Amino acid sequence: MAYPYRHEKETRILSAHFGEPDARTLAGWRKRGGYEALKKALAMSPADVIEEVKSSGLRGRGGAGFPTGVKWSFMPKDESRQPHYLLVNADESEPGAFKDRELCRWTPHQLIEGALIGAHAIRARHVYIYMRGEFFEPAQIVAHAIEEAYAAGIAGDDVMGSGTAIDITLHLGAGAYICGEETALMNSLEGRRGQPRIKPPFPAAVGAFGQPTTINNVETLCAIPHIIMRGGEWYRSFGTEKSPGTKLFNMSGHLVRRGNYEFPLGFNLKELIYDVCGGIRDGRSLKAVIPGGSSVPILHADEIDIALDYESVAKAGSMLGTASVIVMDDRTNMVKQVRRIVDFYTHESCGQCTPCREGTSWLGRIMRRIENGQGRPEDLDTLTSLGRNMVGTTICVLSDSAAAPVLSSIEKFRDEYETLIRSAESAAVAV
Amino acid sequence: MSDRTTPIRGNPGWAGETGEFGHLTEEDVRGVTYVGARPVEGGAPGACSSYPYQIAARHPEAVLFEGAYAKRLEKIRSRYPTSRGALLPVLNLAQEIHGHLSPEDMARVAEVLDLPPALVRGVATFYTMYNNRPVGRYLIQVCTNVACNLCGADDVAAAFLDATATETGEISSDGLFTVIEAECLGACGFPTAVQINERYFENVTAKDVPRILDRLRDEALNAAGAD
């Protein structure tokens, strides 16, 4: 059940046992059918596991939406380049996203089971769960579950009597959003600064410690046991043709009932906000929605009657991303909130690429000037030109992510910017 | 627990709004069975025996990586194919012992991992959870990013600074508190999210701040009594 509120229309697969402390234990997880999927997968060949996941159409839940089975199929099909690594991306830190923390703290064994199946599929001998350092509470819960798995022979030298050896190590980050980018995550795991690498080479060829590597998001791996148990066709019965399955929708901001809800992809955004989450707090009206975490273009209140799947949100001019929906009411100061988002990217830029290192800082300074009533008439053109120069010009997309909310808010809420700038002009005249 | 620190209904112990799961206690939500202990041998090897504790264990005078800590260093190294791979967990361990990373601590880490000191310093200064100077007994990190900001995070941050009579990053005169603003903590559905040492406090409003500080003072007193 999604947490901390439920809705009758939900399809609860990954979130079925949220809010049940007993589900955290190995005994509790087994009582709920846990590790049956791993047993089944170990009896299948790696190629068959990959085929089943391919047939499910599951797409990566970390934001990019790349088909998981296809990603797995890029790994070497033999043992010639061992060791292979599976890295679990639990570095959740996109503003608006809070699903992986719930999956880790309520259902740690669901994650471990999915990760072990993934490791079997790509012939990985070691799974590193890279979790952000701030997630101390979920980390201790996952660490405990890893120990239980070792003690029960589920992880270690002979996984469930299959003869396959798979180690699991929980690796804690130390505070850097950029480490959620897969190549930065690999650098960080190797003991380097979290700076993204240029691709190619892709991780399946040259990944962590120079070895073939696959990186999967927590939510992606949590779906795997269900797909193995019930089949790719069953999974495809949820969601849309191109975006199959269910997804956790992370609902935050000015809502009556915030929290995570699980629905098939393609669920309507307007229904999600007004019916499922009880609408806007304090009887206010809606001003804007960020549908996929702080990195994606903002939608105006009149643009929200859309289906939440990868294709429909892209068609509406934004991105589904992590399905992290941030809702803003009519009192929201858009310039201030967008500036706060830009400050975040300025802080988190790794500093490698000039358009990002300098661009995020300039965006922030100009936005702050406007917010404080000292904007200049040319500022909106400067912001637009600067933002456009930050798109597609850097190693990773952090730069694009910083520009997206600025460009989209200038386009959709230009009057707010202009009002602030006009007040600056009249103040100057008065002096 | 004294009256003044009684948890709010529906938000037990500030572990976050429980909504329709009102039967859950703070212990249930946090998973206290697993969370909170700081075993000197580091606990689970699968977790590298190393957590990013942001304040010192109560051994500030301890020499880095001796005794039980030497064993933990070895446990950490055994989980990585390269010495360098152990760098972040070993920095975590150093910070657990001393509460912050001094230049001498970084040099010692470089020595035990056989890495160039400049490289260790470059990594240690990249990540925000490594304190480059001492902090109070409770490091209070208020998320002021967008999802919390929409719900009053700026007021919460101001209330913590006001009630502790500190400026951002200072240690309060009683040595108990350091307040800083944090980037998104990944608890956006439970605004305002505040990380206090290892724990998250959630759905915090400015009004809650005095009661949270009272609770922390009580905990510090109780811990002192137990020593």
Image (cartoon, coloured by chain):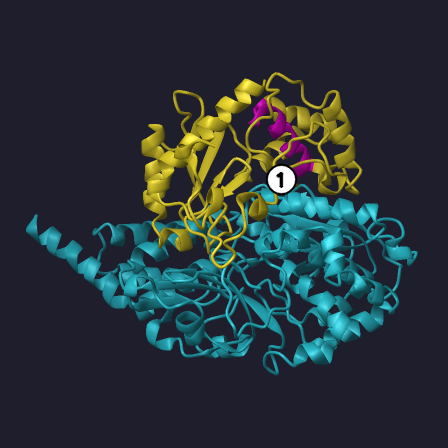
Q: Locate residue A53: give its quadrant.
A: bottom right
Shown colour of chain B: yellow
Q: Is residue A389 left or right of residue B163?
A: right
Label 1: which residue?
Answer: B35
* Total marks placed: 1
Q: Residue A352 at what x, y percent from top left?
A: 54, 49
Identify which amino acid the numbered label 1 is placed on.
Val
Q: Locate residue A328: give its quadrant.
A: bottom left
Q: Is A381 a magenta residue? A: no
Q: Is residue A152 left or right of residue A289?
A: right
Figure check: A313 above or below A149: below
> Can residue A46 be seen?
yes
Which region of the structure is painted magenta?
A: B87-103
The chain coloured cyan is: A
Q: Locate residue B121: give its quadrant.
A: top right
Figure check: B120 above or below B173: below
Residue at the location (37% across, 54% down)? A363
Q: Residue B87 at what x, y percent from top left?
A: 68, 36
Residue at the location (64% across, 58% down)? A218
